[in-house]
């Protein structure tokens, strides 16, 4: 997978969520390889990570800087778009850690 990250205030990430969802539907056989998650930076500001199966698709996510798979956060605050099994292979929710 190829990953990018970008910070957004409030719901400004919405157009990219829609774009990722459209790509996921158009590439149904690879739906597990489309993801968007976020981590809180501060109130009303989050870092969004988008993952796609092909590098060429990253051009559709302007302003996202490349992120190596090994540099992804292991713990996130929100799942925006993802197959749940594929999500669980890479990430944990912050709120789940607090319960432990």
Image (cartoon, grey):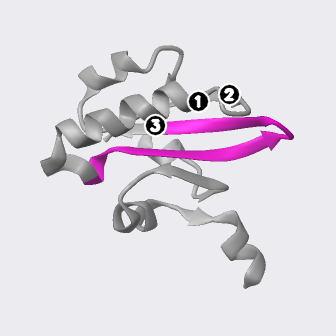
Q: Which mark is residue 50?
A: 3
Whether the magenta-drawn stretch holds residue 37 is answered as: yes
Q: Earlier in the sequence, mark 2 or mark 3?
A: 2
| Image spot of residue 32 (x, y percent) | 28, 54
Q: Which mark is residue 8?
A: 2
Is residue 12 magenta-colored? Answer: no
* Foreground tag (3 vs 1): 1
Q: Is residue 73 above or below residue 21?
A: below
Q: Which residue is mark 1?
A: 13
In the rendered view, does 32 fall on the left or right side of 41? Answer: left
Q: Which residues are magenta?
A: 32-49
How far apart are the alpha carbons under marks 3 and 1? 11 Å
**Is disc 2 in contact with disc 1, using a CB cutoff of under 8 Å?**
yes
Circle 2 Cα neighbour tier, 10 Å, few/some/many (<14 / 14–19 / ≥20): some
Image quarter hosting the C terminus: bottom right
Q: Main secondary structure of the magenta part?
A: strand
At x 74% / y 45%, what residue is drawn?
Answer: 40
- Compared with residue 52, is residue 56 higher up or lower down, i.e. above or below? above
């Amino acid at each position: 997978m190829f990953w990018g990250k970008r910070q957004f205030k409030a719901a400004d990430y919405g157009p990219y969520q829609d774009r990722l969802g459209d790509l996921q539907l158009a590439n149904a056989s690879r739906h597990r390889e489309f993801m968007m998650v976020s981590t809180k930076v501060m109130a009303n500001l989050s870092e969004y990570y988008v993952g796609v199966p092909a590098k060429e698709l990253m051009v559709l996510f302007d302003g996202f800087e490349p992120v190596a798979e090994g540099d992804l956060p292991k713990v996130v605050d929100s799942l925006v778009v993802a197959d749940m099994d594929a999500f669980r292979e890479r990430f944990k929710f912050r709120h789940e850690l607090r319960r432990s």
